[in-house]
Image: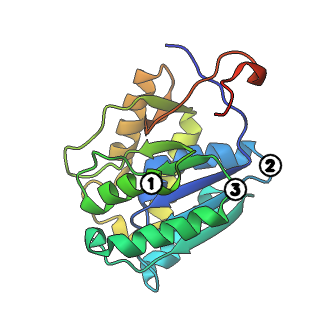
Amino acid sequence: MTDLFTETPTEIAVLGAHCDDIAIGMGGTLLTLAESVVGLKVRALVLSGAGTDREVEERSALAAFCPGADLDVTVLDIPDGRAPAHWDRIKDELKAFRDRCDTRLVFTTQRNDAHQDHRLLAEVTPTEFRSHLILGYEILKWETDTPRPTMFHPLATAVADRKVQLLHQHYPSQVGHDWFDAESFLGLSRLRGVQSRSPHAEAFVIEKAVVTFGSPANTVEGR
């Protein structure tokens, strides 16, 4: 396995179908980026939860997961579990969100997620973010839909532990679920760590990527 290095991002877009999707799927990556990139801009869009206690949880959580970042969070009121019935609005909201972003790096859900809201978001994202690197994160839950990931972001043990702490601190509405515990989250991040030869990791599915070898001067004209 060989590492692939990228430019340091100055802005990222993060998408979730529900409040807590982003933090569960890539909370460790958010912590790492926010703490290593001064002035990082994080633009977040969540499809459901507006006007509820879940929105309060989400705003508090993302602020904690993005310390020092320039954070902008939009939470919509799409009914939980009914995203497919609101395809037109989601498409329009995603386009408006894209127009507010200035980034080429997008994190979202992944296409093979068993939850219909997650799956729809993953399918619609590349129809608006057409020239972007899109990384689909995994969301631990009771369905057996854990993907076979193709990209890993290593995490220090302290970051993995911090992620679990923040999840429990900022999402009290979820702690009653039998899958929402430290053993579950740390077990998955440790597994991904084993697969990437690191203490812990978060894993992603690449929507599509283009790699250029050599200097920009050698790229194909017109790309």
Q: Residue at x 75, y 58 (%)?
A: 68
Mark 1 and mark 2: span between their CA atoms? 30 Å
Question: Who's the residue at 21% across and 52% down the image?
Answer: 142
Q: Is residue 31 above or below residue 177?
A: above
Q: Residues within 10 Å of mark 1 (few under 14, many from 20)?
A: few
Foreground: 46 or 62? 46
- Residue under label 3: 102
Residue 17 placement (x, y as % from top left): 39, 64
The three-letter amino acid code for the residue at tag 1 is Thr
Q: Position of residue 164 (x, y in %)?
A: 47, 51
From mark 1 to mark 3, how far is it between C-alphas? 17 Å
Q: CA distance from mark 3 to mark 2?
A: 17 Å
Q: Nearer the viewer, residue 22 or 123?
A: 123
Q: Which mark is residue 127?
A: 1
Task: Please identify the quarter of the rendering in which residue 189 is found.
Answer: top left
Q: Earlier in the sequence, mark 3 or mark 2?
A: 2
Q: Residues within 10 Å of mark 3 (few under 14, many from 20)?
A: few
Numbered disc in front, either 3 or 2: 3
Q: Is residue 97 left or right of residue 117?
A: right
Residue appearing at x 58%, y 24% in the figure: 211
